[in-house]
Amino acid sequence: MLTIAGKTFRSRLFTGTGKFSSPEVMQEALLASGSEMVTVALRRVDLANPADDIMRVLDRDHFFFLPNTAGARNAAEAVRLAKLAQASGGGNWVKLEVTPDPRTLLPDPVETLIATEELVKAGFVVLPYMNADPILALRLQDAGAAAVMPLGSPIGTNQGVLTRFQVAIIIEQARVPVVVDAGIGAPSHAAEAMEMGADAVLVNTAIAVAGDPVRMAQAFAKAVEAGREAYEAGLGARRTEAEASSPQGGLDFLRE
Amino acid sequence: MFVAPDFQQLRARIAASGPEAVERALAKGRLELDDLAALLSPAAESSLAVMAQRSAQLTRQRFGNVIQLYAPLYLSSFCTNRCAYCGFSAGNAMPRRVLSFEEAEAEAMILHDRGFSHILLVSGEAPAKVGVEYLETVALRLRDKFAAIAIEVQPLETDEYARLFAAGITSVAVYQETYDRTVYDQVHLAGKKRDFDYRLATPERAATAGLREVGIGALLGLSDWRAEGLAMGHHLSYLRKAFWRTGLTVSFPRIRPAKGEFAPLMPVSERDLTQLIFALRLFDPDLGLYLSTREEARYRDGMLGLGPTRYSAGSCTVPGGYGDTAATGAQFEIGDQRSLDEVSEAIRAKGLDPVRKDWDAVFQQQDQGRRRAA
Amino acid sequence: MITILCNGESRRLEREMSVEELLASLGLNPETVVVELDGRILSRPDYAVTKLTEGATLELIRFVGGG
């Protein structure tokens, strides 16, 4: 079981709620994923379509809402969005996203650290989305982050865990759960992250835009479980070169 | 705060490791504590050559073809503790001495002129003779002349470590001696050192104060070396997570004949020591590993390139002994009597570079960043 | 007649009204909407007792899909 800030999750697959073709498809896909935590964004109400509330289909008793700060370009905007999310009944959890570059949507490490410090002081449970930088992960943990969410590859690219080497270091050093976020484009990517020892993955686009989002959600659920199982079972190490099974000599100097 | 695991449970965990566990550990990239237990077990003894090969490979990958050289500088032989195994123990009748600042500086200059830029300041635990102020003064006098100044003295408080760091001390070594509480109580007969837990928390205090490097170790020969190794693994894992800015080192002092004629309670052979060194290298490839002149030249030469990264050379364990070679009152007898040049030559003969410097204490200052409160 | 700025658009209201009345007139369920009035977040119980005055700047915000 995965525990973040005292809350336990049976499923290690977190899902996003963006980009689905309809609220109904989203609902069915998220139920099929087995996911217990879903991310949501905050936006101005569209006054032309005031009844267009896609959240009406999600049972808050079934899905734990993790509001994000998507759209924030600096720490101040992120803190404001987090407080709005809290006022919206989103609880005190927040997936912190600070993405000043609209082209890549890569997270700003400096503003993310500043916002994490502020939000932790204000009593939030902060899960920062971050580039896969091990030192940044440590600094965010030092600042009180409840989990860290390194990206596998830039958001929406479906490229998989291109940051594999860095994510492995983050996992090895982590004092809090590591959730690989962004870039997970196929179930095999999710399994790979889980095999490496990630505590969870967050998937949105790959499910939302699949030909059949419901079946894709099921596929991700299986992949996450398989990856976790493999990690816990203990994978054999990959080798870059063959190693002699019985090396000769080298210790002849030993006397005792 | 680090809590020492129960020593008997550590022994049981190691004893339960079979050949399959050893096989698994040797096949892994990143080792966990269970893997360390396996590599420390008797089941791993037949794999010592494989461990040597992997240890050598990891050491080369992480540190390059380099051995760092250092020398101890004994400041004082006064000690208020009575420890059954130590030549400086309060009960031992021997000439005692504390160096004046001028004498300490003169000794240091001898080492400096020999080419050392890493020194280790050592003293017994006698705060009235060698306290924080004394150490601070020595550090300030030496910081411009040495790249790294480590201390192996009595455990201090966090603010005291911070003060010494500001004065130029770069690292702190505090050996637990044994992680076996029962034996710890038996061999530490009197003095402040009787407090196992205060000593155990010392590396954390030093790391909290911002020291660049913290060293731990067990005095081999007091209790079961395998369980000491696993206990150190636990300690290192804790320190790595809690103090990620701090470099970690391990020393492997093996009990040698000393003035008190203390015979090891559980003797550790060269082969045992070797297995312990390899197991810890495989468990944590980033560790600085010390192999001091307690060990003989033959063994030290044999181990070159296989795991240890730091060698002392030309050491003297008598305060004032570098200037006055007739001085008596050593903490322990030296196993490798060779000079720095001779040791350097042996290192070069193995295709390694003897390095005398890798940092300048004069650069260091308090971190302005927000340090995690331990 | 007063004018307010709501989600960036200028709106004319027939009379002074509470936030709750405005949300009702827009067909919005107050349980799903958070209101920021002149840069300050209103708590839900205040919707009924907070009057909108000339020049008020309102942000009406709610959860939408997001990753």
Image (tube, helix red, strand yellow):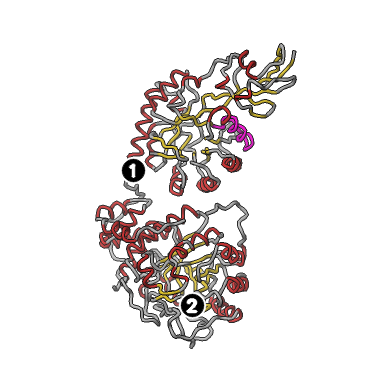
Query: Quick one: SS at disc 1?
Result: helix
Are discs 2 and 1 less than 8 Å apart at CB? no
Q: Which residues are magenta?
A: A68-85
Q: Main secondary structure of the magenta part?
A: helix
Query: Quick one: SS at disc 2?
Result: loop
Marker count (numbered): 2
Magenta run includes residue A69: yes
Quarter residue B233 falls in = bottom left
| Disc nearest the viewer among 2 and 1 | 2
* Position of A86 relative to A167 (above/below): above
Q: Which residue is mark 2?
A: B79
User: Residue at (40%, 59%) from the top-left corner?
Assistant: B4
Q: Quadrant of the C terminus of chain A?
A: bottom left
User: Residue at (29%, 58%) from the top-left corner?
Assistant: B14
Residue A32, position in %: x, y?
A: 38, 25
User: Residue at (74%, 21%) from the top-left corner?
Assistant: C55
Q: Nearer the viewer, residue A108 or B153?
A: B153
Pointer 2 chain: B
- Badge 1: residue crowd in 10 Å (few <14, some 14–19, many ≥20): few
Q: Amino acid at mark 1?
A: Glu
Q: Which mark is residue A232?
A: 1
Query: Is residue B344 visible from the viewing direction of this image?
Result: no
* Position of B333 relative to A12 (above/below): below
Q: Nearer the viewer, residue B201 or B324?
A: B201
Compute the Cα span from label 2 to label 1: 50 Å
- Badge 2: residue crowd in 10 Å (few <14, some 14–19, many ≥20): many
User: Residue at (44%, 55%) from the top-left corner?
Assistant: B238
* Position of B186 relative to A76 (above/below): below
Magenta run includes residue A149: no
Residue A142, position in %: x, y?
A: 53, 48
